Image (spheres, rainbow, N blue to C red):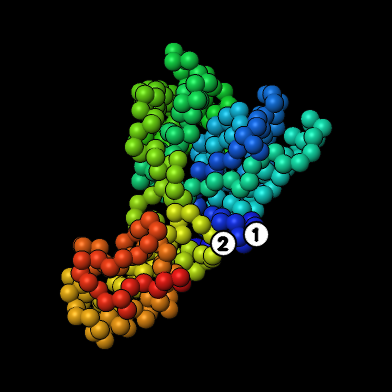
Amino acid sequence: MTVRHGFVTLPAVARKLRVEYPGAIYHVLNRGDRREPIFRDDEDRKQFLGTLGEACAKAGWQVHALCLMPSHFHLVVETPRGDLVAGMKWFLGTYTSRFNGRHKLFGHLFSGRYKALIVEGGGTGYLKTVCDYVHLNPARAKLLKPEQALREYRWSSWPEYLKGSARRWLWLRVDRLLGEYRIAQDKAAGQRRLEATLEERRGAEEGEEFKAVRRGWCLGSTGFRDPLLELMAGEMGEHHGGEERQETAIAVAERIVREERRRLGWSEAGLANRRKGEAGKVALARRLRRESRAADAIRPVPPRSGFVQQTGCRQRRDRASVDKRTALARRA
């Protein structure tokens, strides 16, 4: 598993860190420049799908869900080779060139960098959540009337799921989502059950579980998220921003605290109750200053764990009165 930077931007502009590794799954979202349409007619939509098919063939991508909206698109894609950045560069650049050529235009079609939410697979339910979110988009945007079925929106992968396997897009992979619905076979009976279940959910698309899809950088369990944060720590620079910057700083600091507690034989409560200036605390503080960039994202000692917690904009000592020398480095 590796972590690599994506596009180059001016250092002064905060940007997301691109995380790539073989088998990674993403919810990709990109909008038209100034939120203008990225499709003028159905021929553009067909060209977009054709270009996506070419990208999948080149990179070995597997699409789990797709929805084309007037001014943006949603794509849930798996990257067996860990090549999202290179693939998206080719895909978006090629479609833009073809769109501009067809309509005799020039310049940008898409607005800035695309959003890429990392999604945990493996039958944990997170893939189902993000695919449901994508497939419910036409209803949410009122592109369908209440009495119309979701399958009637043709520019989505949802109607493809309800077809026989021989008639689907070649690059659409359905088995993972069917598995998360506990549907064992890709046959008519399973498809009817799949459709009925999602139609029942139409009234709940603004539920709590979708908030994490619309915001943040990762949709997954703590066990999935923490290793990614550790890997990202070495790549996070001053020009990177967002929620993952704060979470990465916190993860590194918490790991250091856990390691030092084990080395010293201290419990969580023991760390908070040690006297000021004790050699172990001083050594811990020095290591945090040396190895952690957490200063702007965390503050010392929450009531339970005894050391680090996220805060909005400043640091302060907690009720356990940990010595200032054990606070995390300021302005790392």
**Category of crowding for the residue at label 2, using alpha-carbon neighbours closer than 10 angstroms: few (below 14), some (14–19), many (at least 20):** some
**Is residue 138 something that shows in the picture?**
yes
Quick check: 133 above or below 56? above
**Is residue 164 something that shows in the picture?**
no
Residue to which mark 1 is pinned: 10
Percent across and percent down for residue 67 are 55, 32
Q: Which mark is residue 239?
A: 2
Is 218 on the left-hand or right-hand side of 95?
left
For residue 285, which quarter of the picture?
A: bottom left
Q: Tell me what residue is drawn at x 69 percent, y 26 percent.
A: 40
Quick check: 117 above or below 168? below
Residue that lies at the very extreme toward the top in this rendered image: 147
**Category of crowding for the residue at label 1, using alpha-carbon neighbours closer than 10 angstroms: few (below 14), some (14–19), many (at least 20):** few
Is 130 on the left-hand or right-hand side of 305?
right
Q: Tell me what residue is drawn at x 25 percent, y 73 percent.
A: 322
Please tell me whether mark 2 sits on a helix, a strand or a loop.
Answer: loop
Q: Tell me what residue is drawn at x 58 percent, y 29 percent.
A: 69
Q: Amino acid at mark 2?
A: His
The residue lying toward the viewer, choosing from 144 and 135, is: 144
* Marks 1/2: CA–CA distance: 8 Å
Q: Are marks 1 and 2 in contact (CB under 8 Å)?
A: yes
Quick check: 8 above or below 273? above
Percent across and percent down for residue 93 are 71, 45
Going from N to C along the chain, the mark reached first, 1 or 2, is 1
Please tell me whether mark 1 sits on a helix, a strand or a loop.
Answer: loop
Q: Amino acid at mark 1?
A: Leu
